[in-house]
Amino acid sequence: MKHQLLKVMLLATLLSSSTALSIYGQYKWSVVGRAVDSCGKPVPHARVLVYPREDPGGWERIITDVEADAEGKFRYTGEDTKLVNRDDTLYVTSSYPANAVFSGNLLPPFYAVSRVDRLFTGRSLHFKSNEEVNVGDVPVQVYYGVVIVYLQDRNGKPMFTDTKDWEYIGLRIRDIHGRRVEEGDISPADVREAVRVKESAIALALPEGAWQIEIAPDGLKGKRPYGLKGKVLSSERLLVKASNSPLKVTLKRATRRK
């Protein structure tokens, strides 16, 4: 009798597990497409991100972040335990430059600029349960270039040649209209990733377009919302392009007046 009861319990457990797995995998949705340039040619290793349409929130709300293959093709499949009818937004950018600092506001979903610049507006997607959405050829909307900023003192010598000097330096980025799109500090992680200490230089990744860079050697003041503290080194308006050769700019501390 005990053996029969154990068999019944085991069978019930197996059926329950099988049903749970079946339910979990029952509702799926997929997106397939190809990232292309303005001429319709594939863009290898483009980045493809999907966000919720309403209240995208922060990076933790990313639904998917995948890399296209060498032919620009991408595929994403999601699944849920509930019936899925959802509206999301698709963003396709070029691959991210390595060893460079990124502004969080200049990555999808482009919080600071999407409402004022249509270039940064994503593509609407609608999913239904167990449906594959083929978006076809999707033009890459944003290409990233690299700007290397050299910091020099009044005598034209490298200003910061010690790793510790770079931590928490203030950084601000403005768009073509002079609007502030990013302001924060250069973190220890940024220093390890993107600073050339001996040259007193930092590599910044920015979308193609016109930008202005401001750096405060004295860092930030106060708590959020905060500003740059002390004398600010400011670039001219820079035209950034995606290229194998980074744009180089030197910010020099002003010479004291006699």
Image (cartoon, grey):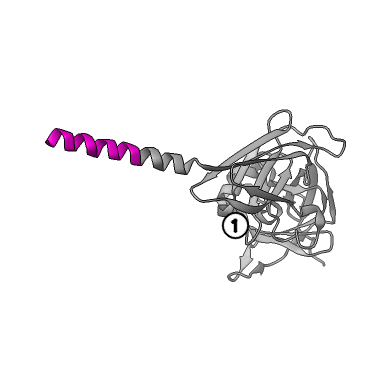
Q: The C terminus lies in which quarter of the figure?
A: bottom right
- The extreme left residue here reads 1
Residue 15 forms part of the magenta stretch: yes
Residue bearing the label numbered 1: 58
Q: Main secondary structure of the magenta part?
A: helix
Picture residue at 49% right of the left edge, 40% below the top: 25
Q: Residues within 10 Å of mark 1 (few under 14, many from 20)?
A: few
Residue 236 shown left or right of residue 253 in the figure? right
Query: Relative to the observer, which residue lies in front, 234 or 86?
Result: 86
Which quadrant would the N terminus be assigned to in this image? top left
- SS of the residue under disc 1: loop
* Residue lying at 66% horizontally and 46% vertically, measured from the top left: 49
In the rendered image, which quarter is residue 197 located in? Answer: top right
Give x and y (percent) for residue 183: 67, 61
Q: Is residue 121 above or below residue 140?
A: below
* In-front residue for pair 33/80: 80
Q: Nearer the viewer, residue 25 or 231?
A: 25
Q: Say if the magenta span includes residue 42.
A: no
Q: Position of residue 125 (x, y in %)?
A: 70, 49
Residue at the (68%, 54%) spot, across then down: 109
Going by the numbered disc 1, the residue's amino acid type is Gly
Range of magenta residues: 1-16
Image coords of residue 48 (percent x, y): 68, 42
- Horizontal side of 178 relative to 14 (left or right) equals right
Closer-to-camera residue (44/10): 10
In the image, residue 177 lies at what x, y percent? 84, 63
Can residue 162 be seen from the camera position used here?
Answer: no
Looking at the image, the residue that sits furthest to the right is: 39
Number of dots carrying numbers: 1
Question: Can residue 14 be spotted in the picture?
Answer: yes
